[in-house]
Amino acid sequence: MHAVLSPSGASRWLVCTPSAQLEQSFANTSSEYAKEGTLAHAIAELILNGDEDFDVKLSFLQQDELYTPIMLEHASDFADYVMAQCTDTYKLFVERKLDMTNYVPEGFGTADAIVIKDQTLKLNDLKYGKGVPVYADNNKQLMLYALGALNDFGHLYDIQEIELHIFQPRIDNISSWAITTKELIHWAETELKAKAIEAYHGTGEFVPGNHCGFCRAKGQCKALATFNMSLAALEFKNPDILTDEELVDILSKKSLFDTWLEAVHEYAFQTALNGKQWPGYKLVEGRSNRKYGNEEDIVHALRANNIKDFYQPQKLYGITEMEKRVGKALFSEIIAPLLIKPQGKPTLVPASDKRAPITSAETDFKE
């Protein structure tokens, strides 16, 4: 279950209030990146809890196809970062579910690690993504978590200050920011509460911006389309040559423009997979690269021909490198018949593309 006003989307729905309800009609699919992050969080939780069945539970998590040894190292680094805050008298809460409904309708979330020590509540968040740096300064997601933590612990401890910590190990990004309890509550009462009510009811104005990046509706949002298409309607001082200022202004919009175009294409692609015919476009089988079939058969064929130099550490050389080492003639004779070429993934292309379109039955088969 996902909250309509999810803390992770707060930086968007606090600015573009109607977006929270707009994206409810779009599937909330979990990407491989999200699943990877979930696994990393589970490992970090296991380390921080110090479970007596640690080895058994870790072994189970390591069976996940997304697990890598570096993931364990990053999760351990996060646990070390949190435990460094746990000195003298402290309270530690791991994967704590938080209720923030006193400020956000149906608002809830889960904090990775909370440390309470010396009138300070330290809220730690593990970010396993590596595409976009995330910072603690005025981080709306963590500010909502802090409000939920105050709701849980404010009556038990004299919390005067909140520290927000972002730990993003894959890009060596560690960020922290502090705000007093009074300042946080003032923000919640004077800004958050009213905006949250607007967002929950889907009212207010659409406001396009970089916050649109993770909105599920961005591929069909008219406000975002109008904003981006306005680039083509810019009026320039010189009709032939852009000034430096005009060029810089266009460059500043590139990130959002690229994100929007990709979202539009992805929406068209996904609906085409489901049978929609887009005028001027078709689904075709994408290109694919050759792969080794049964590697034992490859090794046997190489050894049978007295070829010994075919391994790099722990695995066969790549196909191109192998062909160089074996020679084209022998490669064609003994290795090429043992290669396979997987079907290419469907891709949406202009109708002028020479590749044959995929039929609906073929699409179903690929799915």
Image (cartoon, grey):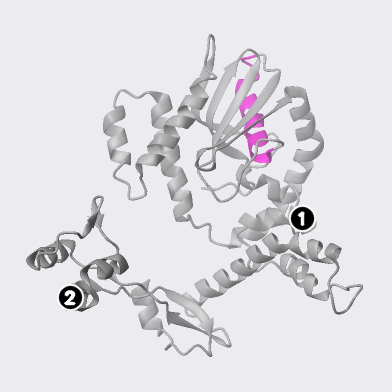
List x then y, in percent, for residue 229.
76, 72
Disc 2 or disc 1, which is closer to the eye?
Answer: 2
Q: Quadrant of residue 118?
A: top right
Residue in the picture at 42% in, 31% down: 76
**Residue 200 falls inside the magenta stretch:** no
- Compared with 232, 94 (above or below) is above
Mark pair 2, 1: CA separation: 69 Å
Of residues 59 and 1, which is closer to you in this image? 59
Assess disc 2: are there few (<14), some (14-19) or many (≥20) residues with their C-alpha within 10 Å of its C-alpha: few
Q: Secondary structure at mark 2?
A: helix
Task: Name the residue carrying label 1.
Answer: 203
Secondary structure category for the residue under label 1: loop
| Three-letter code, disc 1 | Thr
Mark 2, residue position = 330
In magenta, the rendered stretch is 139-157
Tell me the quadrant of the picture where the C terminus can be found: bottom left
